Image (tube, helix red, strand yellow):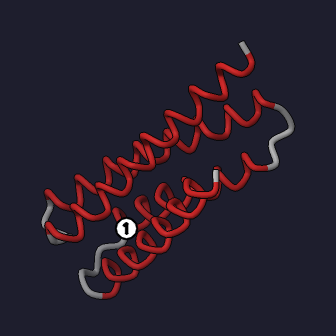
Amino acid sequence: MGVLKDKSYEFALETVRLSQYLVSDKKEFVLSKQLLRSGTAIGALIREAEFAQSKKDFIHKMSISLKEANETLYWLDILKDTKYMEEKRYKLLYTTCKELVAMLVSTIKTAKKSIS
């Protein structure tokens, strides 16, 4: 889980930086807050899952993290399509978030197999 934890943390940092940029340079306050919340929740939930009380609790927390990652993809699309963020930054963050989604799906599937 180390790679997932590290990647989600780095993604959270980039999300914070983007949110700061949107607020200070673009004067955008609503979408940036949504992105900040969902983009940082991914890693926070992964961290929570590290100390889950059971395998089912682990799966539950990772599943919520997956939902947050999917929501983050939505906010990134909105920000790109409304021209609040440039294509290069969008592609970097979107690709990283899609990687997190794939890693979370794999982790959840593996965890579910171990309780079946």
Most extreme residue toward the bottom is 24
Query: Which of the 4 image quarters holds residue 27?
Result: bottom left
Determine which residue is flagged by label 1.
Answer: 32
Q: Quadrant of the C terminus?
A: top right
Residue plotted at (49% across, 69% down): 10
Residue 106 place in picture, x, y as percent: 51, 34
Specify whether 7 is left or right of 19.
right
Amino acid type, residue under disc 1 in the picture? Ser
Dot 1 falls on a residue whose secondary structure is helix
Residue plotted at (21% across, 61% down): 91
Q: Is residue 61 above or below residue 10?
A: above
Most extreme residue toward the top is 116
Query: Which of the 4 image quarters holds residue 85?
Result: bottom left
Residue 90 place in picture, x, y as percent: 23, 64
How many numbered marks have been drawn onto this rendered protein structure?
1
Query: Which of the 4 image quarters holds residue 71?
Result: top left
Q: Is residue 104 above or below residue 113?
A: below
- Within-10-Å neighbours for mark 1: few <14, some 14–19, many 20+: many
Residue 78 place in picture, x, y as percent: 23, 54
Most extreme residue toward the right is 53
Residue plotted at (33% across, 87% down): 24
Residue 20 place in picture, x, y as percent: 40, 81
Specify whether 23 is left or right of 40.
left
Specify whether 86 is left or right of 24.
left
Residue plotted at (55% across, 66% down): 9
